[in-house]
């Protein structure tokens, strides 16, 4: 959400999309490497930033606090923090589908918003 409600300035939209794309890449990294991560980080919470594990802990609250001390808020916005289960999860596909749907919904919302902006510009010009 932009600072002024649901209306994003062009700059806010660019920053938001950049963070969302980076979070998406981090999400993909997590799931693409889950088997490896389970060997090293089973039953831990991990933070993924720039497609690598930057920290982990048994306690998500402790992990979040440490990340807050070490990273800027804008960097934390593009991180993902996820739990690494011991066993291979059965719900993995559902999580991937949900993420793809969220990205698709976001893109649709932004396209609709851009169309509304274009329509408003046309109305003001006539």
Image (tube, rainbow, N blue to C red):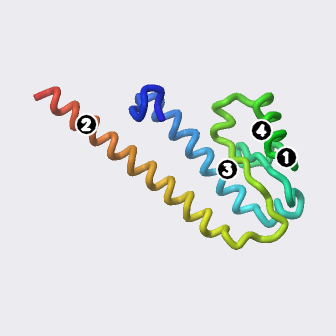
- The local secondary structure at tag 2 comes to helix
Q: Is residue 94 left or right of residue 102?
A: right
Q: Tell me what residue is drawn at x 46 percent, y 34 percent.
A: 13
Q: Tell me what residue is drawn at x 72 percent, y 43 percent.
A: 49
Residue 9 drawn above or below residue 91: above
Q: CA distance from mark 2 to mark 3?
A: 33 Å
Residue wearing tag 4: 64
Q: Tell me what residue is drawn at x 81 percent, y 51 percent.
A: 45
Q: Residues within 10 Å of mark 2 (few under 14, many from 20)?
A: few
Q: Tell me what residue is drawn at x 87 percent, y 49 percent.
A: 58
Please identify the quarter of the rendering in which residue 33 is found.
Answer: bottom right
Q: Position of residue 80 (x, y in %)?
A: 69, 47
Query: Of label 2 and label 4, which has the lower sequence position?
Result: 4
Q: Is residue 59 left or right of residue 118?
A: right
Residue wearing tag 1: 59
Q: Position of residue 120 (x, y in %)?
A: 22, 33
- The local secondary structure at tag 3 comes to helix
Residue wearing tag 3: 26
Q: Position of residue 75 (x, y in %)?
A: 67, 34
Q: Residues within 10 Å of mark 1 (few under 14, many from 20)?
A: few
Q: CA distance from mark 3 to mark 1?
A: 20 Å
């Amino acid at each position: 959400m932009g600072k002024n409600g649901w209306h994003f300035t062009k700059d806010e939209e660019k920053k938001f999309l950049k963070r969302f794309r980076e979070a998406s890449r981090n999400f993909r990294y997590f799931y693409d490497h889950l088997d490896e991560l389970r060997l090293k980080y089973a039953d831990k919470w991990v933070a993924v930033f720039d497609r690598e594990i930057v920290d982990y802990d048994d306690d998500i609250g402790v992990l979040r606090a440490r990340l807050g001390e070490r990273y800027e808020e804008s960097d934390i916005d593009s991180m993902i923090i996820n739990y690494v289960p011991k066993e291979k999860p059965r719900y993995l596909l559902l999580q991937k589908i949900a993420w793809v749907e969220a990205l698709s919904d976001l893109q649709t919302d932004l396209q609709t918003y851009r169309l509304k902006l274009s329509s408003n510009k046309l109305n003001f010009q006539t």
